[in-house]
Image (cartoon, rainbow, N blue to C red):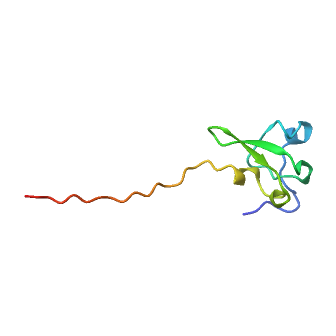
Amino acid sequence: MSRSKWKGPFLKNTLIKKNLITSETPRNSIIPATCLGTFINIYTGKEFKKIYISQEKIGLKFGSFAYTRKGKVKTKMVQKKNNI
């Protein structure tokens, strides 16, 4: 479900007050147009990812650009032949 239109986009108050370039941003905030052309640090749970904000990223959430999960490693199982 998406957020109600009458509420408007979610943007944490600390992002408005602080300098967006050096602050750590919450993943659930929407990227505002004021931070176009800047670098933002997003915490993934292990490390900070430095993300450049371009025109295509405006209106999306910060968390969609810093992945927190690893992909599955596909390995082929080798079946052993039993020599009895």
Quadrant position of the N terminus in the picture: bottom right
Which of these two is toward me, 1 or 51?
51
- State how many labels appear: 0
Q: Is residue 61 left or right of residue 36?
A: left
The image quadrant of residue 44 is top right
The residue that appears at 84% across and 48% down in the rendered structure is 11
The residue that appears at 57% across and 49% down in the rendered structure is 69
Name the spot of residue 6 as percent of width and height, x first.
89, 61
Name the spot of residue 4 as percent of width and height, x first.
82, 61
Q: Is residue 5 left or right of residue 63?
A: right
Residue reaching furthest to the left: 84
Which of these two is toward me, 80 or 13?
80
The residue that appears at 76% across and 50% down in the rendered structure is 62
The image quadrant of residue 74 is bottom left
Name the spot of residue 23 as percent of width and height, x first.
81, 36
83 shown above or below 11: below
62 shown above or below 18: below
Q: Is residue 67 left or right of residue 13?
A: left
Name the spot of residue 55 as percent of width and height, x first.
86, 59
Quadrant position of the C terminus in the picture: bottom left
